[in-house]
Image (cartoon, rainbow, N blue to C red):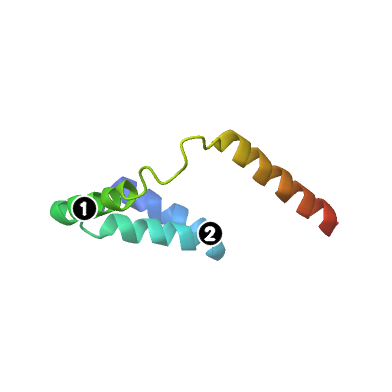
Amino acid sequence: MTELKAEAIRLILKMPENELIPLMETLRKKATPVDPEEDKRRAQAAFQNLHKYIGRLPADFDYKKELEEFREERRRRYENLG
């Protein structure tokens, strides 16, 4: 075992149990080999999925205005809870 792996294990042993969950998820992802062709297929599928939304908004859509209205509505809702 390399010194780097030994140090990683020592650090893991010191960690609280509840902090191991996200670490384990990351380690599982890193330990699973990724097929480059499958990765390419997923990326292309994601692109095609996004591509179907092109042109769906009106030409005069003002995202800044919509975002501000959403934030204002959310702020009012939280103020009414308290």
Question: Which residue occupies 20% across, 58% down?
Answer: 33
Q: Position of residue 53 (x, y in %)?
A: 37, 48
Exactly how many numbered labels are in the figure? 2
Q: Mark 2–mark 1 contact, CB under 8 Å?
A: no
Residue at label 1? 39
Toward the front, the furthest residue is 59
Which is more foreground, mark 2 or mark 1?
1
What amino acid is labelled 2 in the image? Glu
At 39% from the left and 51% from the top, the residue drawn is 8
Q: Residue 26: which quarter of the image?
A: bottom left
Q: Nearer the viewer, residue 61 or 78?
A: 61
Q: Is residue 56 above or below residue 42?
A: above
Q: Residue at x 46, y 36 (%)?
A: 59
In this view of the protein, which residue sits in the foreground, 81 or 55? 55
Q: Earlier in the sequence, mark 2 or mark 1?
A: 2
- Circle 2 SS class: helix
Q: Nearer the viewer, residue 67 or 12?
A: 67
Q: Amino acid at mark 1?
A: Asp
Q: Quadrant of the C terminus?
A: bottom right
Cα separation between marks 2 and 1 = 29 Å
Identify residue for label 2.
Answer: 19
Q: 36 left or right of 49?
A: left
Residue 62, above or below 27:
above
In the image: residue 14, left or right of residue 41: right
